[in-house]
Image (tube, rainbow, N blue to C red):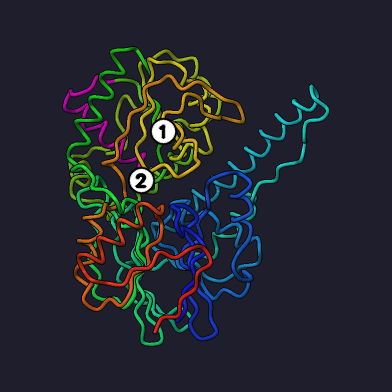
């Protein structure tokens, strides 16, 4: 068995790993790389091998940094199965269509703006920007999904594929791949114990080699319980200023978590019943899928259902689908709350909300997850005096607040605890999905606690497993 690392190698986006057994190739995840526009475009459109030569894709979960480049793979000729859980397949149907739509709309917007500039300045470069893939390419992905429930060993071209609950988001998995007498485990993204909605991560029976994420490999999270108190404080102080709370959130998982907690805080009279808007067509569709897969909910979320309540819907909450309704929010006076995708502020309606609101000191931008290097979200977290939005610098005067406790990624201690049950048989650990500083700390912690060999592969690195 041979593995090659082509995405999420010393970075946190674009998850993609190539596994070769005999003369067959398999791909673990096919995520969208996010970062500087031109670099991202080049990485996302080039694959390590011909798309038609790949036997199968195995998808850990639906987040765009793990699934979002599947339409490009299909565009390049891939037509074989994509194995994943039923919930992940359902989520991807909504998310990939949305991703394609946003890429087409963003390209149209940038081309229109460039054309206007050229009418003023004839020397302005007016090179046509093309979307990475189209809605038609995304539609081509849907028939390829093969839905496999958790704990169901499945033969995939001579390789045995089994999945376990990762606890990261609805439908997320840890994969166990067995071939040539080798058991390779790919963690996907490992969640935290006690997160809202999702069940806790499962222990894996055994592994010879482990590919493990390391997003928060250099830190320890605050207890999940503390997040509710922190969220209440942010809402209350912004409401007293008459400001708006702008929450960039992944449409899948994070939006539903925030909605659930706001629901609880209002029920307990700990925050005022402010108008709240989930402004994301994708989040509207995804929330319907969450309701469909209530068998995956944790006990706390199921308690809402047992009381006859919708955990993701309440009186003061409005789900916004139409663009005209989204634009109308710009004229609405605060205080109110807007939750909108994308989570790293790189595309979609959240970018427009930020452009219209971050210069007002009454407002708050609430960051609820990790922000990748060079993304707009990272620039906001770093509190740069000015941030680039649609190619123009905008003053950042709003309060910037962070809630890291909601992260769907385990921290250093949680990762060490998760791997402990199968550490005895491990020969080597490969750390992915992390930036170098976090990975170096995680690697040292594994060496210190378990005396294992740890490798931090670069993009393109290949290893033979024996």
Q: Quadrant of residue 138?
A: bottom right
Magenta stretch contains residue 260? yes
Magenta stretch contains residue 147? no
Q: Quadrant of residue 175?
A: bottom left
Label 2: which secondary element: loop
The residue beneath circle 1 is 382
Where the C terminus falls, by quadrant? bottom left
* Residue 171 locus on image (x, y percent): 35, 57
The residue beneath circle 2 is 253
Per the rendered image, the range of residues in magenta is 254-273
* Residue 311 locus on image (x, y percent): 27, 39
Q: Crowdedness of circle 1 by 10 Å Cα count: few (<14), some, many (20+)? A: few
* Residue 177 locus on image (x, y percent): 38, 76
- Tell me which secondary structure the magenta stretch mostly adopts: helix
Q: Residue at x 41, y 33 (%)?
A: 382
Q: Nearer the viewer, residue 270 or 243?
A: 243
Where the N terminus falls, by quadrant? bottom left
Q: Nearer the viewer, residue 466 or 71?
A: 466
Q: Residue at x 49, y 40 (%)?
A: 375
Q: Quick check: 27 above or below 393? A: below
* Residue 252 locus on image (x, y percent): 40, 45
């Amino acid at each position: 068995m041979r593995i090659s690392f082509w995405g999420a190698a010393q970075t946190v986006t674009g998850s993609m790993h190539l596994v070769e057994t005999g003369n067959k190739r398999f791909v673990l995840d096919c995520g969208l790389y996010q970062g500087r526009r031109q670099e991202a475009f080049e990485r996302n459109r080039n694959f390590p091998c011909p798309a038609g030569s790949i036997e199968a894709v195995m998808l850990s979960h639906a987040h765009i940094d793990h699934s979002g480049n599947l339409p490009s793979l299909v565009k390049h000729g891939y037509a074989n199965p994509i194995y994943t859980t039923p919930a992940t397949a359902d989520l991807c149907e909504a998310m990939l269509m949305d991703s394609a739509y946003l890429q087409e709309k963003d390209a149209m917007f940038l081309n229109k703006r460039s054309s206007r500039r050229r009418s003023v300045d004839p020397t302005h470069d007016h090179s046509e920007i093309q979307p990475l893939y189209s809605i038609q390419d995304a539609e081509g992905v849907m028939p390829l999904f093969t839905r496999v429930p958790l704990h169901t060993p499945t033969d995939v071209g001579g390789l045995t594929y089994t999945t376990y609950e990762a606890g990261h988001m609805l439908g997320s998995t840890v994969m166990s791949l067995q071939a040539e007498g080798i058991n390779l485990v790919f963690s996907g993204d490992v969640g935290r114990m006690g997160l809202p909605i999702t069940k806790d991560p499962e222990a894996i029976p055994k592994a010879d080699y482990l590919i493990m994420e390391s997003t928060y490999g250099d830190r320890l999270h605050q207890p999940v319980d503390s997040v509710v108190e922190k969220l209440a404080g942010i809402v209350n102080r912004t409401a007293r200023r008459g400001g708006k709370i702008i929450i960039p959130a992944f449409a899948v998982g994070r939006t539903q978590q925030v909605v659930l907690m706001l629901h609880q805080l209002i029920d307990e009279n700990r925050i005022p019943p402010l108008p709240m808007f989930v402004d994301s067509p994708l989040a509207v569709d995804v929330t319907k899928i969450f309701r469909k897969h209530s068998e995956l909910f944790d006990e706390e979320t199921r308690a809402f259902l047992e009381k006859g309540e919708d955990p993701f819907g309440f009186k003061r909450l409005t789900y916004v689908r139409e663009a005209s309704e989204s634009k109308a929010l710009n004229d609405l006076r605060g205080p109110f709350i807007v939750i909108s995708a994308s989570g790293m502020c790189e595309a979609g309606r959240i970018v427009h909300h930020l452009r219209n609101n971050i210069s007002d000191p009454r407002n708050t931008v609430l960051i609820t997850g990790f922000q990748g290097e060079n993304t707009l979200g990272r620039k906001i977290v770093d509190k740069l005096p000015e941030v680039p939005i649609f190619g123009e610098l905008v003053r950042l005067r709003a309060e910037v607040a962070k809630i890291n406790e909601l992260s769907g990624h385990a921290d250093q201690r949680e990762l060490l605890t998760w791997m402990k049950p199968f550490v005895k048989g491990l020969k080597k650990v490969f750390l992915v999905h992390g930036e170098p500083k976090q990975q170096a700390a995680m690697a040292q912690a594994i060496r210190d606690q378990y005396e294992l060999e740890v490798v931090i592969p670069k993009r393109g690195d290949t290893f033979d497993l024996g």
